[in-house]
Amino acid sequence: MAEKSNALKKLFSYLIYKDKKQVKEFYIPEADEIRKQQDNCKVTRKDTTPPQEQKSKGIKKPVPISGVKQDKNADTQKADDKTISTDITENMKYIKAKFNASVNKDIVLREFMIAEKYKAFIAYIDGMIDKNVVNNYILRPLLNGEKFKGKDEECQLDFILQSVLETNQLKKITKHSDVVFDMLSGNTLLYVNGCNYYISNETKGFPARGVEKPVIEGVIAGAQEAFNESLKTNITLVRKIIKNHNLTTEYIKLGERNQNLCAIMYINGMTNPAIVDEVKRRLKGIDIDINMGDGMIEQLIEDNTFSIVPTILSTERPDRTAAHIVEGRVAIFSDGVPFAKVVPVTLSALIHSPEDAYMRFPYGTLLRWIRLLGMFFATLLPGLYIAITNFHQEMIPTELLIAIAKAKENVPFPTILEVVLMEVSFELIREAGIRIPGIVGNTLGIIGALILGQAAVQANIVSPVLIIVVAITGLGNFAVPNFELALGIRLLRFGFIIFGVLLGFYGIVALVMLLGIYLVSQKSFGVPLLATIAPRTTRSNDLLIRYPIWKQERRPDLLNTLDRSRQPEISRKWTQENPNYSHDRVGEDD
Amino acid sequence: MRKLRLILFFVILVFILTSCTTDRHEVDDQVYTLMIGCDKGIENKVRITIQFPTYKEGGGGGMGKKGGGGSEEGEVSGTLVATIEASSILEGINLLNTSTTRRISFVHTKTIVFSEEMAKEGVRDYLQPIARFREARRIMQIIVCKGTAEDFIKDNKTQIGESLSKAMELAAKQSENSGYFPEVPFQEFYTATISPYRQAFTIYAGLNEFKTIKPLDGENVKKNSPLRTEYNMQPGDIPRTGNRKIEFIGMAVFNGEKMVGSLSSYETRYFLLATGRFKRGIFTIEDKNSPGDAIPFDLRLARMPKTSAHFENGVPVVNVKISVEADLGAIQSRIAYEKVNKINDLNRHLANIIQGGIEKTIRKTQQEWNTDIFGFGKKIAHNFSTVTEFEQYNWLKHYKEAKVNVDVIANVRRTGLMMSSSPIRNNEDTILSKERK
């Protein structure tokens, strides 16, 4: 009976309403709640802390050296954000507190006695430093007492600075904020009791990628180096190319939380100082939480946030950066990003490739024109196709028109839908292609070509002519040497498609005009984007036709460099001279 | 952001206000007439025949020909032909939309055909819509055909390839290779009809029923093969057989908007030579030293003809200087005309024939129709100080009074792949190479 009633109860339990069973779930509390909680903790902890410390002292840790001979001076300063105490305990306490060392296990504080006399400690962040350097060139000389023999007891730190430490970069640090930043940058801090400053040792030793081949700016001729994530390496790569004593690097810290180091490079005495000033002004005027590199910097310092075309050149090539710096531009680097930003730029700089300069004159010019053609296709072709097929059928040769009509006979969609469909699929392939794992990546091309090309036509979703149009458009887009410009062009393409389908050629011409007006109004650090064309400047010998290298005698006029001339009128002096080994051809028939 | 919104608003406004988007047509929503034919109507003013391609796969060859009885519709070379009677061309085409499932578009019309009957009554009413209507293009060919335009279009098909439009374009282009007919785009025809300097002319075409060629094994056939050089034929008269019935030969001559007569094939050539339109063609003359033998030349203009005009005692005098070049095609008599001492003879002979031909043709246009298709008026006008004076003089009326001097210089430049015509030896005559001088 009981069993039966149980079963009945269970049955009823499914039918009748019940309160929901309470399950404890995680939630993110408001910041105020957290603060309140912490305040409560502090109150309670005040009573319990001292015994805990005692406990830990007694059981876990051996007595620290700083605690061995503590001459309890009453006049020791407390260490805080502004002042560095002369007492080692205070300073250790400060650093521990600053880095939350009780929890944060990356912070290493190593106490020791210098030459068995002076109390000292070194502090660093585990993993950021080169252990070899710290062990062999900081600790060993310090612990070895021989060098200290015969030295008076005071002013040890200067002596250490000058004669003992064997690291290449040393500096005194008198501010706690710098202490923190140096530690975070991977330097090792040394403190000796009794001093009111630290010594920062250059011991950076975090893992970094080597210098590899450029990924998105590959060339056939020319250097095959690319920047990597290390700021110092990047600057070195540029310095390696420009061996000029005027090449100046300035550092600026950016980012409230991550204190990312940025560098600007220019040639002092040649680059217009106004440009350098403006770049520094804009960089210093940034107040931002986290700076993830020059991609973010670009967005923060560019003239117009909503500009369709980029107004700052981004490059991963040291040679290209160097060439621009020598032309009188300023390069901006950021730690942790394998790119450099170059300002100010014009549109023509964005469509040039470093290859142009490396190739001989006729080839360089040819390549440039092919790229221009590619840009034209990438921007206009789908728009023109739509305009022609929807408004201007008379422009297509009759046979082709009939062929298009025949092919389109079974396609139920209007041309605009076909174009949008194909363009979107193509964009999908591109976007997916970046993220697809390497092994699968190779097959993506086949998938794209097969599915989108063959199958779509066979399924009567798109007409075959369109496949050609989209394919050429895609190829044209890849021919654009600047990735960001290529993105801008992708965006514009959709504009041209819309105008093409609504207004035909009239619309396309109208948008070209609007685009022209828009581009003329854009500026990059005071330089009009279409300079040398729209605000007419002195003729450039490196605009659409790349003149022979020896004909490019002037730096770009628009940069107002302090030194205008790039090279003398005659840069190939040997053409003026007679060869050392020559014979007269006078009298010979030719 | 507000600026952006404002821009967007204006862009949308432009689209709405211009309402251009209503002009949008998909490629396959329309059919493109390749040929328009105009005949005199029975019930209404004009009978229009249009020909447009179908969009079926492999249209033409394999589809077979339908429309045996009705003859209103039938598939010809992947195209359909439709005929309607209406008050005007444009409305007729519009009326055809009632039966054609797609919008009929003019933008690819290659040719407009007028029947001779209609052309003789005047084509004024039908030029306007083509000149004025946006879709019709002024590069279309104008043809006047013998017989009805309807029959003409029904026989407009392609045998060589699949594309009729290509066949039509190339057929008109053959003018450049032969010079038997001119190539006249609508623009030229139309401006000529309204011009005070010249009169209109156009291609004369017709259907060849293959009856003028006599069968080789027929009765009462004498095969003595006489030499006839100037092939003065009318359309449909060329002795030939074949597949394509359509042939373009000669030209229709207009006085204003009315057709007044026609020039035959050689007269057309002389006309083209005199006006500088002649590209090249094989030109056969009879060998005066050996009657019955022909000398074909590959003839072309050496330079554009120079025309000048002035008045002498109130009589307009026109001087035309023509310089032609010729390559020897063959010398049937094997007389060594290539030799330096004989080549001038040949030059003079050729020049005389061409000069005579051109003079005859000009005289024909003067005396028979008084229509200046040569465009001498342009040069005559130089003698007047204002256009009004010229228009008051009315050149087109005075054309027949003009004295036209034609001066032809012929130059046989190349002898082909042979340096000289060696005699042909047989087993009877003894010929020594040295004797031939």
Image (tube, coloured by chain):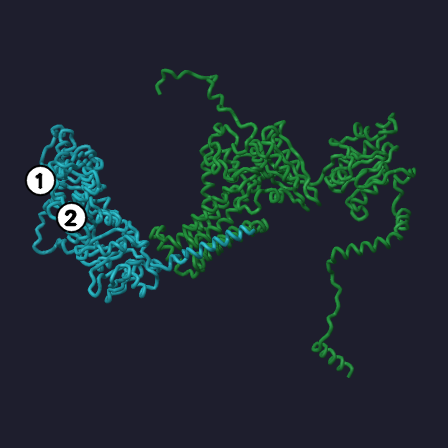
Chain colours: A green, B cyan
Is B121 left, or right, of A25 in this rendering? left
- Which residue does the image show at 9% across and 38% down from the upper left? B290
Classify mark 2: residues with Cα within 10 Å, few (<14), some (14-19) or many (20+): many
Instruction: Choose between A334 and A127: the one closer to the eye.
Output: A334
**Residue A265 visible within the image:** yes
- Marks 1 and 2 sit apart, C-alpha to C-alpha, by 27 Å
* Residue A108 marker: none
**What element does badge 1 sit on?**
loop
Instruction: Choose between A96 and A7: the one closer to the eye.
Output: A96
Q: Quadrant of residue A418?
A: bottom left
* Residue B263 marker: 2
Residue on which the image places disc 1: B291
Sequence-earlier tag: 1 or 2? 2
Is B260 left, or right, of A574 in this rendering? left
Residue A3 lies, in percent from the top left, at 77, 81
Location of residue A263 with respect to A381 vertically, above or below: above
Badge 1: chain ID: B
The amino acid type, in three-letter code, at marker 1 is: Pro
- Which residue does the image show at 50% across and 51% down from the upper left? B7
The amino acid type, in three-letter code, at marker 2 is: Leu
**Residue B243 visible within the image:** no
Residue A35 lies, in percent from the top left, at 78, 54
- Where's the N terminus of chain A, which quadrant? bottom right
Residue A477 lies, in percent from the top left, at 49, 46
**What element does badge 2 sit on?**
strand
Badge 2: chain ID: B
